[in-house]
Amino acid sequence: MAEYPYTILPGKEGKKAYKPLINVSLQYKKTHRVTLPIKALIDSGADVCFCADYIGIWLGVSLIQSRQSTEFTAANNQKFIATPSLVTLRVAQKTYEAVFYFTSVLPKNIPVILGQSGFFDKNKITFDAPAGIIEIE
């Protein structure tokens, strides 16, 4: 089991905002490139895992839109297109392959989103907000 502290960010009205951000690394087998640790948001509301397209380009992932490209709707009802690719995810002392959807719409400060398919379905996650800890098994 791995434990991570919640990340404390400035919130509205001077209050603190606690975010489930953890460090992950991504690897693309075709190029053997591995990222340095990247901040990723654990998002139980995301159906899949997302990654910023500039990270995919650095890894060498082909991001040409194809029949596999999928339209998604963000929490703010904006529609966007993302292109899937199989990458290796390194998280919580585990390494496994997962499909990530690469897109240009992610904010620069949160370039990776860990969702249901590819993260939650492969790990047991416990959010312990009162203790300020996220546990991943």
Image (cartoon, rainbow, N blue to C red):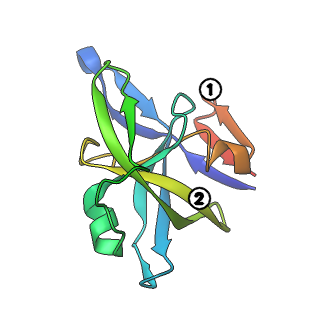
Residue tagged by mark 2? 98
Residue 40 image point, x, y percent? 44, 50
Q: Residue shown at 46%/75% (left/top)?
A: 28
Q: Compared to 65, does 42 lie above or below? A: above
Q: 92 and 129: which one is in front?
A: 92
Give the secondary structure at mark 1: loop
Corner quadrant of residue 60: bottom left
Q: Residues within 10 Å of mark 2 (few under 14, many from 20)?
A: some
- Pair 2/1: label in front: 2
Say which amino acid is labelled 1.
Answer: Pro
Residue 115 position within the rendered picture, expressed as x and y whole percent measured from the top left: 55, 40
Q: Quadrant of residue 16?
A: top left
Q: Which mark is residue 130?
A: 1
Which residue is situated farthest in the front direction here?
Answer: 67
- Asked whether 82 or 127 is in front, the reply is 82
The secondary structure type at the circle numbered 2 is: strand
Give the x, y percent position of residue 21. Answer: 46, 45
